[in-house]
Structures are given as C-alpha cells and as structure tokens.
Image (cartoon, helix red, strand yellow):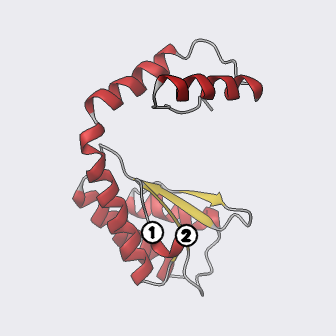
Amino acid sequence: PLGSVLVGDTEFIRLAKRARKRCGGGMRQVGVVASMGMFAVKNNIDRLAEDHARAKRIGHALKENGFYLLRDGTIDTNIVYFGLPEGCTLNKEEFTQRLSSEYGIKVTGGYSSGGKLYRAVTHMQVDDAMVDRAIEGIIAVAKSS
C-alpha cells in the first residue's frame, strides 16, 4: 500500500519518479517509510544473504516434499511462493488457519491467477530454528489432509 524502496543512480531514480507520477503515484508524507527503507539499506544490506539462504532452504525442502514452486524452485530473494502438493484437499483458509494455530506460522495465500499460491517471507526476525519449524509445519499440515 505504501510502495517500495528503490535503489539506483541519479538518472534511474529520476526516470522512476517520472514513471510513478505517470501512473498516478503522488503520495505525500512517505518520509517515515522512506527513512525505514534508508535505514535498512544502510544497516542491513549485508545480512540479506542470510534471509535469502533461509528462503532457499524452505523452497528446497518444500520441493523435495512434492510442493509446487515457481520457476522450478529457483529462489533469488527472501520470498518463497509455493503451491500445495497434489492430493492436498485443504482450502486456502484451512491451510493458513491451521499453520497459524498449530505452528504459529503466518503465510499468506491467494497469489497467482488461480489463487493457489502461498507466500512465505524470511526477514531479520526469522532465525534457523524458525525456518526448521516453518518447514516442519507447512509439510505436516499439507500432508495431513
């Protein structure tokens, strides 16, 4: 809802601002959001590799257990989009609710044109033990149906 952080040289930013205005983006008072983005770029950029590695672990484990992954499981960021394995009969609400109530895992669903993809995101507050728990929970809930 607030946009994203854009990083680039002066000319790239100039063109991006121009494109944003053409698309109706003239949001004011985004300084607070921009300051958070600047803090992240200045202070956390080096640790992004950890988030990316954790996302790859999740994707690899899900693929090994029959889940559908975009781009045949290639994950380049801290975001994992996945679909439930064939034969899983849980709907989006059941799957996300059970993950939350039984494992404390929050994923969002409804991505893609058919709404069958889920999204899991790693970030600086997710450690290796939490990734292990997420993998365990996602697989257990999907296979329980």
Camera-side residue of 6 and 105 = 6
Q: Badges 1 and 2: C-beta atoms under 8 Å apart?
A: yes
Q: Is residue 69 visible from the viewing direction of this image?
A: no
Q: At x 42% / y 83%, what residue is drawn?
A: 65
The quadrant where residue 138 appears: bottom left
Q: At x 55% / y 67%, what residue is drawn?
A: 95
Q: Is residue 84 visible from the viewing direction of this image?
A: yes
Position of the C terminus by quadrant:
bottom right
Q: At x 56% / y 75%, what residue is drawn?
A: 84
Q: Position of residue 99 (x, y in %)?
A: 46, 63
The quadrant where residue 16 appears: top right
Q: At x 66% / y 59%, what residue is drawn?
A: 110
Q: Position of residue 55 (x, y in %)?
A: 37, 60
Mark 1 falls on what kind of element?
loop
- Residue 74 numbered tag: 1
Q: Amino acid at mark 2?
A: Leu
Q: Position of residue 104 (x, y in %)?
A: 39, 56
- Residue 70 numbered tag: 2
Q: Position of residue 45 (x, y in %)?
A: 30, 38
Q: CA distance from mark 1 to mark 2?
A: 7 Å
Above or below: residue 110 compared with residue 59: above
The quadrant where residue 47 appears: top left
